[in-house]
Image (tube, helix red, strand yellow):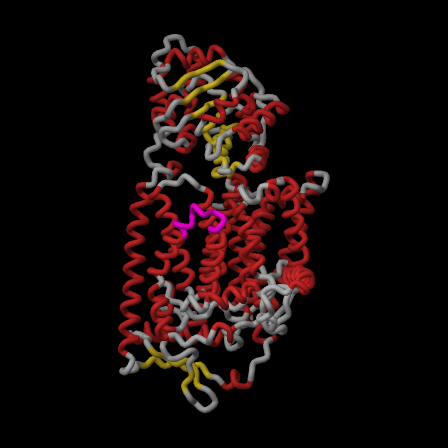
Amino acid sequence: MFSLHRIIAVIRSHPRLSIAILLYSAGLIHWFAFIALGHPTYQALDWPLIHQWLDVIKQALLTGRVPYHASYFLNEFQTHQFIWGDRFFAIPYITVSPQVLLLGLLSVHAFMKVQLILLYTLGFLGVYQWVKRLDLSSGAAILLFLFFNFNGFLVGRMGVGHLQNAGYFLVPWFLLLLYRCLEDKHESYSRSIAHGIEFAFLVVFVLMQGSLHTVYQMVLVGFITMLFYPKKLLWYGGSLLLALIGATYFIVPNILYGQYPHAVDRIIFGGYGLASGDAGAPLIAAKNIITMMVNGIYHIWQALTVAYSARFDATWEYSVYISIVGALVLFGSLMTVIAKKRSLIQGVVHRDRFVLAAIVVMGLSFSSVSYHLFNALRHVVLLPSIDRLPSRLFYYPLSVAFLVASTGFDVFVSMVDGKKTKRAIEWIVLFSMFALLMIHSYGWSVNQTEKNYVRSPEALTQKFYTVIYDRLDDTSYKKTVAVSYGVSLATVLVCLGLYGHLRRRDPTRQEKSSTTPSSQDLVRSAREIFSRHRHLSFREKITSIYRPLYAPFDRIIPWIPHGSRVLDIGCSAGTFLFLAQTVQGLGPSQGIDIDTQSIQRAKDVNTFNHITFHTSITISDDLIRQAHVITMVDLLHHIPQAERTQLLTRILRLASSGCTIIIKDLNPTPRWRAMANRITDYLSTRSRVSYMPSSSIVELFRQQAIEVRCCENMYRHVWSHYLIVGIKKVS
């Protein structure tokens, strides 16, 4: 039986996961109500097209016919109508991903709800991955969730029936895959291929949702980003080539048989800073530059803070609403990050090229630059529908701004004195932002959009009427479709097999390795090692042989790569180094401690020529710079508060690029476990615990360009620990 106390205990033991579940549930309720509340008819704006494209697939599944040709409507003269020709597979916006098989069981209305919730779910998982990667607090995680899931860019498009553009939900995954590849400059060949397959899969999957515009934008944004990382251009080119082969089902039929309108005919406006219809303005007009910049800033502020609805035609292509509260928090948090990390400005060319690429992309959403770029590309790229709206590109740098701002939210709010006051203001800000976003979202809900948008007389006479037929004179088109889909399917299956093979061989997945011994195995290994020492007291046995029983060495050791040069600071009797050598196999490694007896005990049992131990109260700069991995296991709580921050900062600053820093220490929460920590530590070392919160370490990591790969609380019997693993970014 679940009780309130048990639920509270679960939330306290897994705070990040609990908050994620609550946030996901809130979004699930929101998007279901958004598309279903008020029983909409789905007959306004683009909803009729989406409905009928899906109905074609439904009728095909029910009748067992391949829908090579189809019509969707009857007009006032009872004449069959279709959009962009009757060749169904040459329409660029149809959904062909595996979930369409559900149309054999569900109504079209039900499937549209499932499709929206599915894409929201996948997008939420991408946001959650960023929350873990950035190690965000609860408040910052909620802020990022609100930014990504309820902004006007998504809400407006879904409201007017751009369900095919639900691929925008996957922008967090796009940025994550791009960033994950760029951050690792020394990845293995097989891992690089695996990353390329992941990126290609994402592009093809987004295209399979009918999100053609999203794919164009991802390809362009990725290319601009790679211009700042020229060593990765080959990887990016290979990934795109693989994606193009996987997208054969789309590319070939659309190039040969598509009837999409000419690209220039689809231009609405040129971008922020220009009025609607100014897309053809000169690329450079010096006398209007200042006016354009001022207008652009005003337009962006307006797009972020003005709550539009379908009453204002085409505002869904302009709005990126996050509310006035959200905009102030966004800019305030960004300024906080810039103020605390000057390298964001001073070292932007070298250390923050990812952000610089986002700034360049943002520039394309201004003026007519993007229009002229796309207008030139249409002469080279034969695909239909080169993206007509530069303002759509703005969502990508805005998404990067969301991520950066979330890392500065806590500091931004902490400018208010008092812990309780800070917490109160934080929740007031988040709740206010949530309320404003919900009010705005209701105005764009499908039912409200149908009420607000005035349909044309021609649209009012249209009737849903799906007919699948077969043109006997169009055999070349049907053969092309069959071959194209066969090539795409074969490519996906081959890549899935290759990807699985590469992942199984990936040596960097140590944290998931099934070969890591248990704590009991580590105790047996430690007993064998220290059996060479004849005079171990009971306390020495507890702190050496039996230490893996209460210290989670089995969770720490897998983070050490095979053959690494390890510097273990505060090594005591060398138990951790010996066990790491036994399990992983180390390169030349050193242990340092200030306790002479512990170091002597380590030397007495040491049989490894490449592992040495030293007694020292200082650590030379060279030792820190030469280490591949630096470990500090249960060290910091023994050092006075004023000294440990200085020591840790120095170690992080001197660590070489790519160095892994592992810190395991005692956790001050929950209190009863913290008391067990104090008692055990006093009995074993005769010292008093001086806790250093994990949040303080994470903040130091960020200041020194250490990317946090792991930050988790761990409980072992009655003791509480935390483990933080970071990798220093390559300058």
Apparent side of residue 260 relative to residue 35 in the rendered image (left or right): left
Specify the principal SS of the magenta part: helix
Percent x, y for residue 230?
Answer: 45, 48
Residue lying furthest right? 417
Residue at left offset 44%, top offset 41%: 184
Apparent side of residue 495 relative to residue 338 in the rendered image (left or right): left
- Between residues 83 and 685, which one lies in front from this camera angle? 83
- Between residues 216 and 719, which one lies in front from this camera angle? 216
Apparent side of residue 565 relative to residue 325 in the rendered image (left or right): left
Residue range of the region highlighted in magenta in the rendering: 226-236
Residue lying furthest top? 535
Percent x, y for residue 352?
Answer: 55, 44
Vertical side of 428 occupied by 205: above or below: below
In the rendered image, residue 232 lying in the magenta stretch gets the answer: yes
User: Can residue 179 be spotted in the picture?
Assistant: yes
Residue at left offset 49%, top offset 31%: 656
User: Can residue 466 be spotted in the picture?
Assistant: no
Vertical side of 186 occupied by 584: above or below: above
Percent x, y for residue 197?
Answer: 36, 52
Vertical side of 554 occupied by 607: above or below: above
- Choose top left, top right, bottom left or bottom right for residue 629: top left
How many marks overall?
0
Residue at left offset 37%, top offset 71%: 255
In the rendered image, residue 708 lying in the magenta stretch gets the answer: no
Percent x, y for residue 686?
Answer: 54, 15
- Choose top left, top right, bottom left or bottom right for residue 380: bottom left
- Choose top left, top right, bottom left or bottom right for residue 575: top left
